[in-house]
Every structure is written in structure tokens, then in C-alpha cells.
Amino acid sequence: MGKRRIRNLIKLGFKDIIGFDVTELRRTETQKKFPILIVPSIKDALKHKPNVMIISTPPDKHLNYVRIAIKNNIDFFTEVNLISEHVKKIIQLTRKTSLVCSPSFTMHFHPLVKELKKLLQKDTIGKILIIQHHSGQYLPNWHPWEDYRKFFVSKKITGGAREVVPVELVWLTYLFNEIRSVMANVEKISNLDVKIDDVYQVLMKFKNNISCTLTVDVISIPSFRETKIIGEHGTILCDFNNGTLKILKRKTVKKVPLKLGNIAKGYGGGTPPETLYEDEIKTFLNSVKNRRKYFYSFIEELKILQVLDAIEKSNKNKQEIKLK
């Protein structure tokens, strides 16, 4: 994600960029790819008095760098967080500051999500009754250039499937409502050489009584991300990979073409286009420039992570969990 954010910044016209990574190999690789300043320590980076810190470390390391940003009065952005206790701490640490700060909310910028928002506001298929969403990916394909067992998606707390769940919950709650209850099955069913849960199956109820079945796995070949939204007067079918959206009614099928943009070189499968990440960073940096709060906060992210916690508690206790 660090390299992706560098690409985003360069595409947006930023040139004064400092790169830091704890791994020398990663620093060398990045220096060859991008015309930016690379430093061997965070202390060296701070000597250049940066205005903004984009924290693209493994999720369990975000809090460490948030503390550094706050201590040095630097506006900051983090990738998706996965540990609710860390986010609670970030909320406490930022409560009395005037810093502009935010976690990632990439899917909000997806053309398909934007179009769905419009269709739902127009009541295109009437009252929504049921949602089915399945995000299936293959973990070894995430970073084709390195062993999947050697980066954070192979750790229990930051496992690949566990990371995708909040990514999906963010846009689902944005479109439909907050979640009232969950009933879940979480387990490892593949022969992937990692000690993580590779499938999350969840029956969710939104506060407006819409039912949703959510499946997230990292064992699917090929990768896909598909959604079916069933309403009183029709159904909407969404294919995120192909960028297609269909509205099915009794006697008609309407295709809504969408322009997704290009996927970064070296990626494939269910990887979203670069434009989503560019729009996200541009929006955040505009908030920094204008000194206004970003529209998605750590408080909002905490709500999402509390749903993730409830999903895992439901699996452990084998019962429905209601959220406060």
C-alpha cells in the first residue's frame, strides 16, 4: 500500500515525498521505482518536517506511527485498521487535537458503489429486502512478487479474510444502514500454509430490517466480488471485477455500464482500479488543505470494527450477537 500511495501522490502532482520502510529491500526497490527521497529511519523522515503522514504499514503497526504523528503535530491518514482497541486509543489521542486525520474508506469511491447510491435514492427496485454479497479472493495472488506467508495477511490478527470483512462492511453500511445483529461462522477450511481463518460467513440484520448474507474468503480461484440486491419490484446484480451493474424487473433487464479505470501493473483478480485510491487521497489532502474534518472518522471506523468483533464473538459462542 505504501507504493500505491506513492503512485497516487505522483499522479496527483505531488513531488516532495519522503519514503520510509523498516525493510532495506523494500527501500531499495522503491528507490528504483520512484523519484522520491528514501530514508532509513522514521527519525530521518521527521527531520524534513513533513506536513502529512500516510501510514501504510501492516494494520497492527498503525498505532505506533499514529502516536509519532500526533507527537509531532502531523496530519495523518491510515490504511484500514483491524484492531478495535487500537482505534479506541486513536480516538482518545486525537480528541483534543486540531489535526486532520482519517482511516481509509476506499470503497466509497468505487464507481459501482456511487451508482448504487443513486439507484437506491431513486427507489429503483422499491423497498430493499435481501442482500447477498460474496467477496472471494486467492491469498497467494495478493502479492505475486512475494511469498504470501511472509507478510501481514498470514498473521491471525491481520489475516487476509479478516482484513477484507471491514472493507466490505464499510460500503454496505454506507448504502444500507448500521448493523443490528450478526450470526457468523468463521473458520479455516483450505490447505493454505497459514494459521488464519480463511472464510467468514455472516448473516447480518441492518437496523432497517434488511437481511444480508456476507461471505468473505481468500481461497477462491478466480477472484470475484459480486452482490445481489433484492427489492420489492426487482433485483440489482453487481459485478465489481467487471464493473457491470444490471437492473432486473419482471419484463426488463437494464445494463448500466460503468468506467472503472485501470488496475495497477502486477495486480489482478479482485484488485480495485487505481482511480479509487487516487480519489481517496485527493479528498483527504483537500481536507488537510482546507483544515476541515474528513467525512469518514475513526469513530465511524470503530463502529465497523465492533461489528467485526461481534462476528468473531458470534462464531466463538455459536449464537446471534446484537450490537449496541
Image (spheres, grey):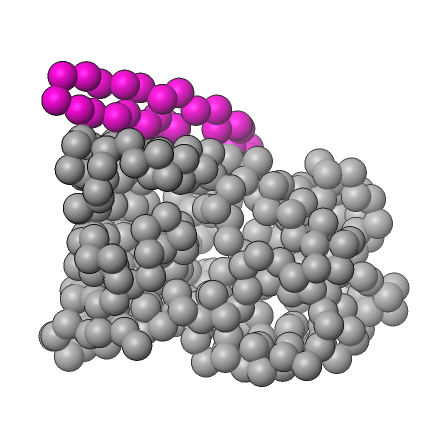
Tag count:
0
Picture quadrant of residue 160: bottom left
- Left or right side of 247 for 287: right
The residue located at (53%, 28%) in the rendering is: 262
| Residue 169 rendering spot, x and y as whole percentages | 35, 56
- Left or right side of 276 for 209: left
The answer to whether residue 176 of the structure is visible from this angle is yes
* Location of residue 238 with respect to 89 vertically, above or below: above
Does residue 263 show up magenta in the picture? Answer: yes
What secondary structure is the stretch in magenta mostly built from?
A: loop
The residue located at (45%, 37%) in the rendering is: 114
The answer to whether residue 154 of the structure is visible from this angle is no
- Left or right side of 289 for 248: left
Extent of the magenta region = 240-268
Does residue 127 show up magenta in the picture? Answer: no
| Residue 254 rendering spot, x and y as whole percentages | 27, 18
* Location of residue 282 with respect to 116 vertically, above or below: below
Picture quadrant of residue 24: bottom right
| Residue 322 rendering spot, x and y as whole percentages | 22, 74
The residue located at (72%, 49%) in the rendering is: 286
**In the displayed image of the protein, which residue is found farthest to the right?**
48
The residue located at (28%, 31%) in the rendering is: 124
Picture quadrant of residue 208: bottom left
Comparing 56 with 177, the one in front is 177
Comparing 297 with 314, the one in front is 297
